[in-house]
Amino acid sequence: MNAKTLKILEYKKITDKLANYAISPSGRDMALALLPSTDVTTIRLAQKHTAEAVSLSLKQGRLSLRGFHDIRPALKRLPIGSILSMKELLDIADFLMAVEKAIAYFKDLEELGETLAMAEFFHQLQSLRNLEREIHRCIISEEEMADDASPKLADIRRSIKSNQASVKGELNKLLQSTTVQGYLQDNIITIRNNRYCLPVRSEYRNEMPGMIHDQSSSGSTLFVEPMAVINLNNKLNQLLLEEEEEIERILSALSAAAALDYDALTANLEALTHLDFIFAKGELALLMDAGQPNFNEDGIIYLKNARHPLLPAESVVASTIYLGEHFTTLVITGPNTGGKTVSLKTLGLLSLMGQAGLHIPAADGSQLTVLENIYADIGDEQSIEQSLSTFSSHMVNIVEILKSADYRSLVLFDELGAGTDPVEGAALAMAILDHLKSRGVLTAATTHYSELKVYALSTDGVENASCEFDVNTLKPTYRLLIGIPGKSNAFAISKRLGLSAEIIASAQEFISGREVRFEDLITDLEMNRKTVLLEKERAEKLHAEVAELNEELRQQKEKLHSQKTEILKQAKQEAYRILDNAKTEADQIIRKMNKIAKSGDAVKELETERGHLRDKMNAALSAAEAEKEKSKRQTKIDLKSLKVGQSYLVNSFGQVGTLLTLPDSGRKVTVQLGIMTATVDVAELRIAAQTQAPVQAKLKSSYKGSHTAKSMTVSREIDLRGYNGLDGIEAVDKYIDDVFLSSLNELHIIHGKGTGALRSQLHQFLKNDQRVKSYRLGEINEGGAGVTVVTLRK
């Protein structure tokens, strides 16, 4: 990619932003070295990596790479047998912990079923947990080795501590001597040249035998190692040398262990650097609110609501820029500072970013084409040293562009043909654009020349564009309008600023009629464009409202269908439940009576009664279903008789609802069904007074009616006096059946006191009857021991 273009379009500022989001030094270096690719497969893969990083950052959080230090210098020294420092080894251990976190992160993604294009980098990671743990076991910090890094080091340090204690003990004895105290500048122990000393006044140097290691800057204090501790200090220094040697040996062993894993460390560094770089691209995309562009090789660029990535997000104006499908050359006109150059740079910079695998600040659905090169002639190239004018310097650049550009290039010209005679400059500009168009080069150029507007209007493959300007506020809107040539607006601006109408009218007389008509044409085009945009916005709004209403209608139909199905299902289940309960109850009666009955005739009679009960229930169900079918075949309602607010049966729902609207042209009516509102065909309506309730309601009302009838005829008490045991039990069993179907919950059984035999048999029967909740003998006012009061389960 052309290096000069990268500089003009400020591509480096994008890579600098990207580098700020990389965590590791190697990741930052990769970001700073990022260049656009010209291979479509590479570009699409890089775009996919960025999209995955954005998705994972939002769903799982960004991959944590804390501790990813720069281990590249240390890795370079390992193969030649160098001994690494404690800091370098700790950096390697922290790096390996970051590798472990990345492996765990990917394992979680696999458990969630994520399939990633960046998985290749996770698969390259190798766990070196043993090396990491050994380094952290031996090294505490960048300057401290752990005592237990080796048994020998632990022994040496114990000896050092013992020897230091001995030295301090001897020196403390001297400090406690009143004679010696008189020789000292301070009553302290100090260290000079790794040897313990006492600060002695210079005038007493001969009174304190020993070795002088240092003196104060004034010369008044001498730091003397007393003779009593010289041998102990010598021993201590020997131990310190042994400590250093052992630490060096441990570092050598750890470095050798790291060297054995050199290939794995190198592979981990490369893979983790790529992952850091990919997630940095994701962070940048989220910051810019950028999206993934689709790439083609057909020479088509379509940037929807594109924003320049280096301008403040709160002030930048989005513009839609397209090129290559219906035209290859775009001529942008308009006033200065109106946004023409920003549009050019946006087109070029977003193309560079896309081919570098970065997401672009544009709406979804944007397209970019794979370009071999981008050429830009933007800005003032005047050179005093080369004695080149603005026009000459631009022309030197243009000549180089014309030599190199082809159908896979994008060329950007700012103020093409400026800096010379307007007539000649416009002619050169048209010739240059025509030449590039004939070679199929994608070209965008800004200009002030009216001749280029005419050229764009009259030439196939060339399109006008302009940057919108608000005459009322005298400010540009910075919005690019493709298909509309720009106006200079000089007269309008001058008038708004206070220039007299007389001067403006005089100036207009100097313009030819053809130019005036052309400017008027531009004005008409602008007015028509605004009208079309207004109508388009209105149509889009109506279309959105229709789509929303259709969606609401679809959801309402689905809800009604679901509720209808549920109602029918519940009715059917209720019918089957009633039938099953009746069958179960009949079976219980038969089993109980089988225990009581002694003759075959009694069994036959009970079985016959059970059959009659089943037939009765089946007949009730059949009648209910027949009534439902009958309601479906009823005569259709006369449309003229329909009245809003009247109740009708909705046949498809089996429910009565209130009519809200009369039939429309499609014979549809709206009915309120409880909390629901349904739109149905008018043929579904029936007159509510002539219909029957659904199966569920009929069964329920029938069952309820039987309760009411029974409660009106069943007495609250039964008199068993004069009955023997078996006859009394049979009478009570039938009586409880009748009471159970009534609304009564309590009954009185009169059995008399007598011998108590009937009462005992009765209580035994009640004890085992599932219908009975409890029983007791009556109170004095209820008949005392001659009456049993029974409470039923209901």
Image (tube, rainbow, N blue to C red):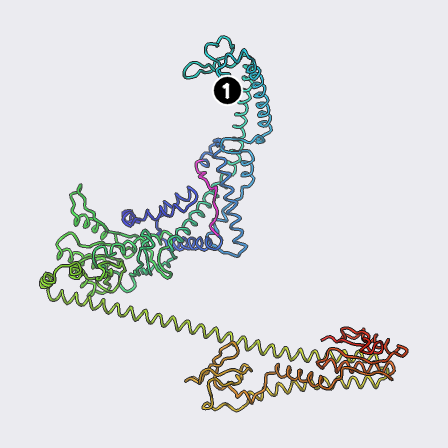
Q: Residue 631 appears in which quarter of the rendering?
A: bottom right
| Residue in the picture at 44% in, 85% down | 663
To which residue does mark 1 refer? 190
Pick out the residue farthest to the right: 755
Residue at x-position 17% and y-position 53%: 418
**Residue 398: image location, x then y, percent:** 21, 51
Q: Position of residue 350 (x, y in %)?
A: 33, 54
In the rendered image, residue 697, in percent from the top left (x then y), is placed at 61, 82
Name the foreground residue: 393 vs 658: 658
Front-lying residue, 430 or 169: 169
Q: Taking the image as drawn, is residue 688 in sight?
A: yes
Residue ranking furthest to the front: 781
Q: Which residues are magenta?
A: 61-73
Q: Main secondary structure of the magenta part?
A: loop
Is residue 248 positioned above or below 294 on the image?
above
User: In the figure, is residue 492 to the left or right of 443?
Assistant: left
Residue 392 picture location, percent across and down:
16, 48
Q: Is residue 493 one of those drawn in magenta?
A: no
